[in-house]
Structure formats: structure tokens, C-alpha cells
Amino acid sequence: MDKYDEQIAYLTNNPNQINKLWDKAEGLFKILGKNSNLRRAGCLTMIKPDENRAVPYYPLDEKGNILVELNKEIINDSGIPNDPFLITIEKLPKFAYYQRKYDALVAETTHNAIDDNDFHPDRDCYN
């Protein structure tokens, strides 16, 4: 059992704490990367497109590069809501899946990230 499993167990017994933990951006709801000058790192719900969100958020590696494949996967996953108030106990395993995947990608290397000059949001993120 890892930290994400422990948080799922806690939230399963305390579902009223989901939004409080989301507000703290911890564990299952942590920000995927650090904000850089040009790009904004976001949690899973913030990475999902939302017509009310003026600017996009991305999963970023430690250098601030967008993790393109992970970004595409999150955007296309119907199990991740774009609103924290839509997070349910049933969706928590998806959050754990992506947090683990992000942790592994960042620990492994940044070779999955692309250079600023090669990134095209229309082509790389929303297809």
C-alpha cells in the first residue's frame, strides 16, 4: 500500500474531505510540476479542458517542459473531471494512477518532454 492507496482509503471513509484535500493540492490532487515563466502546472482537474478556464494547465517535468503524452492521456480520459466538485470516491483510483505515472516519469527522465519550439497545443494536446 502506497501513499495514494492510503489517501483513497481515508477519503473512502471521509468523502466530505475530498474538496478540502483538493484545495490543499496534496497527494492525489497535487500539482503535476512547478509553475514556470511561460507554462502553468496544474493538478489533474486543471489539466482537463474547461471552456471557463482562460489558460491551459499542463503536467510539467522538473525543467518546466510539458509532458506531452501524459497531457494527451489525461485530457482524453473521461474518468478525470475538469471540476473538483465532480470528484467522487469511484474516480480516486484514476487520480492515483496518474499521480504514480507522473512520479515515475519525473523520476525516470525528462526525455518525454519536448522543446518550446516544437510544442503546438492544437496538434499535441486536444486531438
Image (spheres, rainbow, N blue to C red):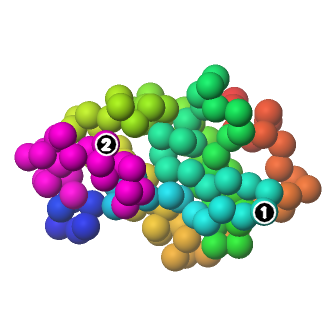
- Residue 67 seen from this side: no
The question of residue 20 being in magenta is answered with yes
Q: Name the residue under label 1.
A: 37
Q: Residue furthest left?
A: 13
Asked if the residues shown at circle 2 and circle 1 are in contact, with their CB atoms under 8 angstroms apart, the answer is no
**Callout 1 amino acid:** Asn
Image quadrant in which you'd find residue 125? top right
Q: What stretch is highlighted in magenta?
A: 7-26
For disc 2, the marked residue is 19
Q: In this view, does 77 lie above or below 28?
A: above
Q: At 48% from the left edge and 40% from the top edge, which residue is drawn?
A: 45
Frontmost residue, 54 versus 31: 54
Q: Is 41 left or right of 36, judged from the image as shown? A: left
Taking 115 as reference, is 67 left or right?
left
- Residue 68 lies, in percent from the top left, at 68, 51
Q: In this view, does 110 lie above or below 15?
A: below
Q: Kindly give the residue lying farthest to the right in the view shown.
A: 117
Reply above or below: 47 against 113.
above
Residue at x-position 34% and y-position 61%: 27
Q: How far apart are marks 2 and 1 (CA)?
A: 28 Å
Q: What element carries label 2?
A: helix
Relative side of 83 to 65, left or right = left
Which residue is drawn at the image coordinates 78% and 62% (left, top)?
Answer: 37
Residue 27 visible in the current orientation: yes
Which secondary structure type mostly characterizes the magenta part of the structure?
A: helix
Task: Tell me where residue 23 appears, x and y as whole percent.
Answer: 39, 50
Query: What residue is rendered at 29% in x and 48% in y?
Result: 20
Q: Quadrant of residue 122?
A: top right
Query: How many numbered dots are placed on residues in this image?
Result: 2
- The local secondary structure at tag 1 comes to loop
Neighbour class for label 2 at 10 Å: few (<14), some, many (≥20)? Answer: some
